[in-house]
Image (cartoon, rainbow, N blue to C red):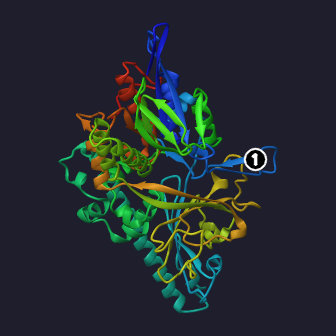
């Protein structure tokens, strides 16, 4: 901090990372970080290691045949009314235009025999993609007849009556199992919410994974493994195994808050959000990778050092990166300081923060934009906005084990193909336009390389019971319905924001909520500045 008897005191804040959490933190400090006496002013510096800001860095532009190109968000970012309270308020304040996505969902499986020594890009041509369930945006259930190919004209074959009967019986069985299991899960999730059990650490559900909870209440295995887990593995962008290890309260609360709610997307792409959030921010450093933090030796508490050896003074550091990236920077900082001294408050604080960050786990995912319709179900009538596909064990997606365009073996995750045309207001929304833009997350089949538009690899936080305890104990503990700041927040004026460090599934809501809480209840209180967002109280529950 710098003081001047003729002007306000300047508080320098470094924000490392430019996802939604980092940009929201910077926006709140620059826009509303002014005290009534104007004795303090915040000077915010935002650091992004890539060449463009993180929230829109992987998005692409495609030609529409009109004057301006169309932006496709990568990854696709949707948000649901009921669950995204803080995000909706932020977007409304910014004037960000949103539109209903009207998602529909389809489940299918890849099966069939493939020739030996087949290239990965040809596997989709030698296998079948058969739908077995659809779920409409109107929150109703419809079933795809998986036995249609075996059904013949009753008058031409006497056995066809048996096939028709088998088809009807299987359809009815699936409908009963899916509908009854869905109602059972929804009923429990709403009941828990009504009795405030999600915030009750003594209730059994708070100690269970979602896989354990399914067994505890007796949900049918078909619904669990063929419907629910593939769907939520797509929502959380992780493996089926990791999805079963998710805390039950996070998944069930998401369902309870989302019942009968609509999903939305930003009308003009997340680039519109980035533009509005960065408008008041003067100091944006792109292509700058912060390597470590050193204790300051003058008017400021910290000195940041980047990969080119350049240094930056600051009073507060907000880590708006992934937990593993923040851990790496802090570990380098610890090692650097330990060479200078064996004991200091800085080393003690950073050691606790590193220990906390190691409790968060990540999985790698890939998002490919392409125009290869082979990754959609074979039956065009079964196409949905979001197509959730699983690969049978008999299929080898990467026979030569050298494909760069599929998720790595054992492919135990959901391949989610989003038909972009159906949610983008500027693209041709006919069912089969001349160009169908597709975005496949975690492809288990390789798209035709000639039809690939972009490939982006990401790391996504996957929640465990232990990582949730880290939030409860070290980051944002809750007492009597109020969220507080934990012991790892603000230690040596180092703060953490992001989807991973907030309660629930790591989504956009956690980015906004954690950023708001750190800025308002953390930095604002530390510097005795009343920072009040225009969309409501700073008490986040």
Vertical comparison of 127 with 334: above or below: below
From this viewpoint, which residue is outermost toward the front? 340
Q: Where residue 105 sits in the image (x, y, percent)?
A: 53, 60
Q: Where residue 263 sits in the image (x, y, percent)?
A: 52, 46
Residue at 75 percent across and 47 percent down: it is 69
Q: Where residue 530 sits in the image (x, y, percent)?
A: 40, 19
Which residue is at the front of the view, 135 or 123?
123
Which residue is at the front of the view, 312 or 155?
312
Badge 1: how crowded within 10 Å, few (<14), some, or many (20+)?
A: few
Residue at 60 percent across and 68 percent down: it is 405
Query: What count of labels does the image hold?
Result: 1
> Which element is circle 1 on?
loop
Residue 521 occupies which quadrant of the picture?
top left
Vertical comparison of 98 with 468: above or below: above
Q: Is residue 39 left or right of residue 110?
A: left
Which residue is at the front of the view, 285 or 514?
285
Q: Where residue 477 sits in the image (x, y, percent)?
A: 27, 39
Q: Is residue 468 left or right of residue 157?
A: left
Which residue is at the front of the view, 403 or 442?
403
Residue highlighted by disc 1: 69
Quadrant of the image for the C terminus?
top left
């Amino acid at each position: 901090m710098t003081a001047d008897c003729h002007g306000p005191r300047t508080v320098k804040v470094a924000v490392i990372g430019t996802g939604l959490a980092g940009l929201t933190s910077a926006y709140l400090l620059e826009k509303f970080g002014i005290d009534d006496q104007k004795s303090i002013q915040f000077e915010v510096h935002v650091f992004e290691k890539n060449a463009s800001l993180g929230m829109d860095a992987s998005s692409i532009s495609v030609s529409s045949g009109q004057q301006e190109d169309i932006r496709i968000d990568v990854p696709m970012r949707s948000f649901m009314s009921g669950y995204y309270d803080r995000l909706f308020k932020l977007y409304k304040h910014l004037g960000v235009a949103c539109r209903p996505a009207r998602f529909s969902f389809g489940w299918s499986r890849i099966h069939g025999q493939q020739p030996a020594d087949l290239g990965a890009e040809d596997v989709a041509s030698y296998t079948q993609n058969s739908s077995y369930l659809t779920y409409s945006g109107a929150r109703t259930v419809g079933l795809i007849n998986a036995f249609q190919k075996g059904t013949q004209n009753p008058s031409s074959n006497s056995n066809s009556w048996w096939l028709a009967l088998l088809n009807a019986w299987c359809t009815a069985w699936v409908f009963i199992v899916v509908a009854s299991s869905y109602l059972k899960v929804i009923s429990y999730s709403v009941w828990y919410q009504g009795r405030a059990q999600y915030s009750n650490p003594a209730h059994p559900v708070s100690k269970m994974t979602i896989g354990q909870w399914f067994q505890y209440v007796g949900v049918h295995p078909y619904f669990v493994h063929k419907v629910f887990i593939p769907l939520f593995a797509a929502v959380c962008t992780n493996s089926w195994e990791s999805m079963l290890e998710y805390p039950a309260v996070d998944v069930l609360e998401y369902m309870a808050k989302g019942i009968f709610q609509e999903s939305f997307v930003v009308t003009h792409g997340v680039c519109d959000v980035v533009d509005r959030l960065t408008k008041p921010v003067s100091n944006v450093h792109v292509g700058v990778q912060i390597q470590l933090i050193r204790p300051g030796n003058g008017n400021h508490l910290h000195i940041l050092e980047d990969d080119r050896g350049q240094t930056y003074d600051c009073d507060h550091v907000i880590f708006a990166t992934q937990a593993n990236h923040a851990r790496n920077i802090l570990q380098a900082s610890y090692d650097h300081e330990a060479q200078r001294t064996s004991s200091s408050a800085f080393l003690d604080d950073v050691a606790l923060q590193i220990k906390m960050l190691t409790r968060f786990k990540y999985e790698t995912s890939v998002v490919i934009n392409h125009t290869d319709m082979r990754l959609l179900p074979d039956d065009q009538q079964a196409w949905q906005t979001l197509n959730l596909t699983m690969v049978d064990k008999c299929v080898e997606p990467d026979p030569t084990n050298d494909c760069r365009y599929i998720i790595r073996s054992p492919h135990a995750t959901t391949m989610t193909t989003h038909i972009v045309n159906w949610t983008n207001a500027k693209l041709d929304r006919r069912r089969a336009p001349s160009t169908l833009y597709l975005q496949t997350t975690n492809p288990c089949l390789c798209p035709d390389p000639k039809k690939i538009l972009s490939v982006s690899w990401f790391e996504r936080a996957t929640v465990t019971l232990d990582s949730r305890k880290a939030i409860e104990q070290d980051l944002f503990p809750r007492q009597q319905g109020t969220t507080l700041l934990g012991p790892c927040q603000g230690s040596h004026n180092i703060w953490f924001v992001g989807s991973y460090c907030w309660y629930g599934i790591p989504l956009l809501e956690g980015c906004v909520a954690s950023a708001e809480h750190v800025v308002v209840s953390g930095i604002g209180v530390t510097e005795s500045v009343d920072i009040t967002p225009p969309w409501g109280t700073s008490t986040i529950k």
